[in-house]
Structure formats: C-alpha cells, structure tokens
C-alpha cells in the first residue's frame, strides 16, 4: 500500500501524520505585502475615511456619498464632451423616429 501524499499547500491537523506533513511543507515566509490597518481613502467630492489595505493611501473619483445610484441625483462625469455628443446623437435619432412615424401615418391616410 502506498503512503498518503499531500500537496505542499495542504495543511493537515490533529495527528502524527499531520505533524510530519506540516514539517515537510511549511508556509512560505515574507511573500505577503505589508497590510496598513489605517489606510486613508479620499474621494474627489471631499469625503474621507480609513480602512485596511495593502496601500497606505487610496484616491477615488466617485464614492457612495456622491455616486448617482446612491444619492438619486444625476451627476455626469464628462470627459472631452462625450455626454453632449451622446445627447446630440440621441436627439437626432428621436427626431428621425418621429419623422418616420409621421410619414407612415400620412401614407395610411
């Protein structure tokens, strides 16, 4: 009968076999990043709070205090006029849809 073999990442507890396996495959040391328990988080709206993270400082563009989904207010973050371009395209497509409907109604009469 073959002896039981365990992968190096498996931890076995509670027996003599467990002690033998754990001595053979100890966890690697110094592979985890430093953990900051008081990492500061800053949002573009000015909201700040502390949390735990692997980086000491986090900068956000939108948080739960200024996000439109949570506040119920419409806030568009415009980059290079993309919102205006989109609104113009939507207005044109709605106008085309209205003219098509009106032409169909004229043909039926």
Image (tube, grey):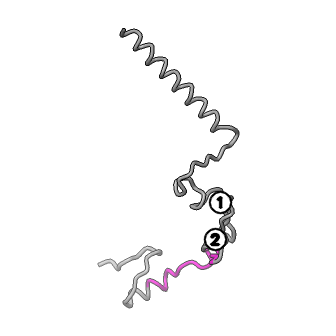
What residue is disc 2 on?
A: 49
Where residue 11 appears, x then y in whole percent? Answer: 43, 80
The residue under the point 64% across, 47% down is: 77
Frontmost residue, 73 versus 16: 73
Q: CA distance from mark 2 to mark 1?
A: 11 Å
Residue 41 in magenta? no
Task: Give the number of the mark in front: 2 or 1.
Answer: 2
Name the residue furthest front: 109
Give the image quarter of residue 49.
Answer: bottom right
Q: Residue furthest left?
A: 1
Secondary element at image label 2: strand
The residue that disc 1 covers is 60
Look at 63% across and 76% down and name the residue there. Answer: 35
Q: Which residues are magenta?
A: 21-37
Label number found at residue 15: none
Mark 1 crowd level (few <14, some 14–19, many ≥20, 10 Å Cα): few
The quarter in which the C terminus is drawn is top left
- Identify which residue is drawn at 36% across, 10% down: 108
């Amino acid at each position: 009968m073959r002896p039981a073999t365990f992968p190096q990442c498996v931890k076995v507890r509670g027996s003599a076999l467990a002690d033998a396996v754990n001595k053979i495959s100890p966890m690697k040391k110094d592979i985890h990043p430093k953990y900051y328990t008081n990492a500061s988080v800053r949002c573009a709206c000015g909201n700040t709070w502390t949390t735990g993270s692997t980086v000491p400082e986090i900068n956000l563009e939108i948080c739960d205090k200024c996000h439109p989904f949570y506040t119920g207010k419409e806030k568009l973050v415009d980059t290079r006029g993309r919102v205006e371009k989109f609104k113009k395209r939507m207005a044109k497509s709605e106008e085309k849809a209205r003219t098509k409907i009106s032409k169909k109604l004229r043909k039926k009469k």
